[in-house]
Image (cartoon, rainbow, N blue to C red):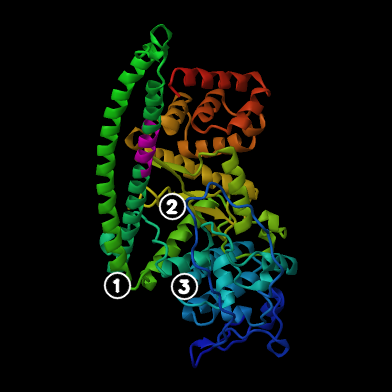
């Protein structure tokens, strides 16, 4: 292809070489081909406010997995709008894409492929920096699905993507990349942490927002402690009432005109217990007073930070560089999802994409599989902090890549371990299947949460400690976390169905620290001697109070 730039202006003239146009399925300008750069704007995308509920006990059933097809790719100027306004970055991406598609020599094509990958990410970064604005639809679709040029995927594939439910109608924290960046740009979600991130680099609104989230978490924890102490008092009061009722129910002395008798042996015991309960209630009351004082302080601090945040305009917006940094963090997540030996080509092409909506990780498919996995591993999203256990679903970033497995970026935010969400990424176009992509992400989350919980004892205690000791005893090589993820995949997909695929010791570790629901355990007890023995160990631990 010739370089279709106007040398007098240094920009594209807006024409595509006819041979390349035919190759990529774009008609000539006379028949409606898109000029490359102009001021045309597509439909605007308006995202609903975040409404995730951390108190819900389980996922709500998915009402629908697709919707009526939308004309996402009908605009004849799609390519022009997608690249429009991005300057030299877009010019380079266009030139390399054209050369790549026209190249026939495998060696040259490989070189062009690598250059195109770099150019595409620069283009996507340029678009991402504008996430605080309402992006035209082609730019949104480039970020969301990796569709740079719509004719690189088949009509059937375009129809499939057009049926993906576009907006988040649920209250679950699952986001496509364009949605995620918009939330970051609006300050509604804190930027993901990296090794380079320093608190001193935050702006004043960002610092206030971080402090507000931490205070909100501390207030929630303190409120939970007060509620827990009230339950303890109510239980002690109920026991006291029972003992007092026993004391008031006197026997009668038939030998002395049916007078009330002295306390019997049981009542004398109850009398001693009344004294103990009264002392216990006194202690509990003092603890409750202390907790209410701490709750008052937490409430006051939260109120002050809310006022400061409101004075700064509520949710803090962030600068373009923060959004660019977040985009590059997402790019690292994508790189991890793809893996070393995976397909790192970021542009959606028909030879890499399946045409069945069930085979891609849409928001609804991911929610469905997360719900199924949680039913097998009920403790998956449970987090205990200062004696308070909450179900906290992580943020899920649906990454547009041909990935091998999902990953956990962070188990929770550094400034709020109590109630903040973790962050996981799941590849939208998995190389195996949707279920495996989701399970591996949740397995990574499981490992990292348990490791953080055990802190510097992670190689000695709990799930990670027992698994690490088994791993070391077997003299296995490689990353212990990767072994765990694959074993967790087997645990959820095979062992939960009674198929004995895991090492015996690993099965025992998972049975204790990642227990199935009781109904699943009861079912498995009838499936074989192995599960029956594990159930017996459960009973023995329960009787010895060691479980």
- Residue tagged by mark 1? 311
Tell me which segment is drawn in magenta. Answer: 227-236
Disc 3 crowd rating (10 Å Cα; few below 14, some 14-19, many 20+) is many
Location of the C terminus by quadrant is top left
State whether residue 280 appears in this view.
yes
User: Which tag is nearer the camera, tag 3 or tag 1?
Assistant: 1
What whole-number distance in Å separates the C-alpha atoms at marks 2 and 1?
A: 26 Å
Q: Position of residue 245 (x, y in %)?
A: 40, 25
Q: Position of residue 466 (x, y in %)?
A: 44, 28
Relative height, residue 439 to residue 184 (above, below): above
**Residue reaching furthest top?**
255
Residue 421 tag number: 2
- For mark 3, what is the residue? 131
Residues at marks 3 and 1 touching, judged by CB atoms closer than 8 Å: no
Q: Name, please, the residue furthest toward the bottom.
A: 8
Residue 423 image position (x, y, % from top left):
46, 53
Question: Could you say which is closer to the camera, residue 439 or residue 17?
Answer: 439
Q: CA distance from mark 3 to mark 1?
A: 24 Å
Task: Identify the image quadrant of residue 490.
Answer: top right
What's the magenta bit mostly, secondary-structure-wise?
helix
């Amino acid at each position: 292809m010739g370089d279709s730039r106007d040398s007098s202006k240094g920009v594209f003239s807006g024409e595509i070489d006819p041979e390349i146009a035919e190759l990529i399925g774009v008609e000539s300008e006379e028949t409606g081909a898109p000029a490359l750069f102009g001021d045309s704007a597509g439909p605007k995308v308006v995202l609903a406010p975040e409404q995730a509920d951390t108190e819900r006990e389980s996922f709500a059933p998915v009402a629908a997995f697709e919707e009526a097809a939308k004309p996402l790719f009908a605009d004849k100027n799609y390519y022009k709008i997608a690249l429009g306004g991005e300057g030299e970055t877009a010019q380079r991406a266009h030139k390399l894409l054209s050369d790549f598609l026209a190249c026939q020599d495998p060696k040259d094509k490989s070189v062009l492929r690598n250059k195109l990958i770099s150019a595409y990410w620069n283009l996507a970064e340029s678009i991402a920096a504008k996430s605080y604005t309402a992006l035209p639809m082609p730019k949104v679709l480039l970020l969301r699905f990796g569709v740079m040029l719509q004719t690189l995927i088949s009509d059937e594939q375009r129809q499939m993507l057009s049926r993906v439910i576009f907006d988040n109608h649920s209250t679950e924290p699952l986001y496509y990349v364009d949605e995620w960046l918009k939330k970051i740009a609006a300050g509604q979600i804190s930027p993901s942490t990296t090794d380079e991130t320093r608190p001193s680099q935050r702006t004043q609104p960002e610092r206030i927002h971080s402090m507000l989230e931490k205070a909100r978490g501390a207030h929630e924890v303190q409120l939970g402690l007060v509620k827990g102490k009230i339950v303890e008092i109510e239980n002690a009061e109920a026991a006291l009432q029972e003992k007092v009722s026993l004391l008031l129910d006197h026997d009668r002395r038939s030998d002395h005109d049916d007078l009330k008798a002295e306390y019997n042996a049981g009542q004398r015991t109850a009398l001693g217990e009344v004294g103990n309960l009264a002392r216990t209630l006194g202690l509990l009351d003092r603890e409750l007073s202390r907790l209410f004082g701490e709750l008052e302080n937490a409430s006051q601090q939260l109120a002050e930070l809310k006022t400061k945040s409101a004075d700064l305009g509520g949710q803090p917006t962030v600068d373009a560089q923060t959004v660019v940094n977040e985009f590059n963090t997402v790019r690292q997540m994508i790189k991890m999802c793809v893996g070393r030996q995976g397909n790192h080509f970021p542009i959606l092409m028909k030879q890499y994409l399946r045409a069945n909506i069930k085979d891609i990780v849409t928001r609804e498919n991911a929610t469905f599989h997360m719900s199924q996995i949680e039913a097998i591993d009920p403790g998956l999203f449970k987090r205990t902090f200062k004696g308070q256990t909450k179900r906290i679903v992580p943020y899920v970033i649906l990454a547009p890549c041909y990935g091998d497995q999902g990953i956990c970026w962070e188990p929770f935010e550094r400034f709020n371990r109590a109630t903040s969400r973790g962050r996981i990424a799941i590849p939208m176009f998995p190389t195996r299947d949707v279920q495996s992509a989701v399970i591996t992400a949740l397995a990574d989350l499981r490992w990292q949460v348990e490791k953080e919980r055990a802190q510097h004892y992670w190689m000695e205690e709990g799930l990670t400690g027992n698994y690490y000791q088994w791993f070391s005893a077997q003299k296995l090589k490689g990353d212990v976390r990767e072994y765990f993820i694959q074993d967790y995949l087997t645990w959820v997909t095979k062992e939960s169905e009674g198929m004995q695929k895991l090492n015996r010791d690993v099965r025992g570790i998972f049975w204790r620290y990642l227990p199935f629901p009781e109904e699943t355990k009861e079912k498995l007890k009838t499936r074989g001697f192995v599960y029956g023995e594990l159930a017996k160990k459960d009973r023995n631990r329960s009787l010895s109070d060691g479980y």
